[in-house]
Amino acid sequence: MQNSNIAKKMNQTILLPKLEEKKLVPVIKIDHGEDAAPLAEALCAGGLPVAEVTFRTDAAEESIRIMKQKYPEMLVGAGTVVNLEQAKRAFAAGVSFIVTPGISRAVIEFSIEHKVPVFPGTCTPTEIMTGIEYGLEVVKFFPAVQYGGTGILKTLSSVFPGIRFMPTGGINANNVKEFLAVKSVIACGGSWMVPGDLIGQGKFDEIKDLTARAVLLASR
Ligand code: 3PG
């Protein structure tokens, strides 16, 4: 109960309506910090001032810092946060939210303590119940398509009516509408509008166009 009260004091009240409005969370793997500013610009120009910068590369922390400095209004989260050390680095970089691929109590507790919204990765009832124990309102459902897609998501939603989901993993332009149609889905994560090869080749205009198309699709 104490955890629940603390969680409600997090910045979720500000973040969740914004996520719900944008409906999409671009999942980014960025190799070079110098790509962070043009990438953020492309996302914003495409109508999606949201980024989940994954800690799968050494450039993640620097990229988050650059994006937040250049676009302070942008929601810049840290993704693939797997341990406390990464959560601390993400927090120090000014992150708007933290996403984990699975349950890490250390990361969840650090995020709650520092009032950073945290979306732990879940795909089983037990993992969702861990999120509930911490008073979380939203969890990531990962990997969404590979673990059964909207079918299992609807079943989990009926079991946990107070929980909202951010499905991620295998979502793209072909199936995003199906996920967004599930009532409990607050937003979908995905990398299809920010492909690593386009980032590496500096093709930010193409990323802007892919983003704009994704935004249009999600808004219909
Ligand atoms: C994630 O980290 O959430 C996923 O790897 C993103 O999945 P996708 O590349 O299939 O969109």
Image (tube, rainbow, N blue to C red):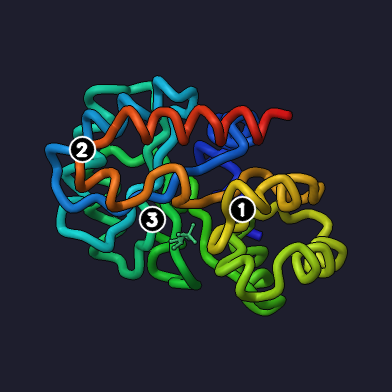
> Marks 1 and 2, Cα distance to the nearest angstrom?
29 Å
Query: Which residue corresponds to mark 1?
Result: 166
Query: Which residue corresponds to mark 3?
Result: 79
**Residue 19 quadrant:** top right
Can see residue 175?
yes
Residue 69's x, y, as percent? 22, 26
User: Few, some or many C-alpha atoms within 10 Å of disc 3 (few <14, some 14-19, many ≥20)?
Assistant: many
From the viewer's perspective, is 57 left or right of 189? Answer: left
**Which amino acid lies under the numbered mark 2 shown in the image of this protein?**
Gly
> Marks 2 and 3, Cα distance to the nearest angstrom?
22 Å
**Which amino acid lies under the numbered mark 3 shown in the image of this protein?**
Gly
147, above or below 78, in the image: below
118, above or below 50, in the image: below
Considering the image in quadrants, where does the N terminus appear? bottom right
Earlier in the chain: of badge 1 and badge 2, it is 1
Earlier in the chain: of badge 2 and badge 3, it is 3
Considering the image in quadrants, where does the C terminus appear? top right
Q: Residue at x 47, y 49 (%)?
A: 192
171, above or below 70, in the image: below
Tags 3 and 1 in contact by the CB under 8 Å rule? no
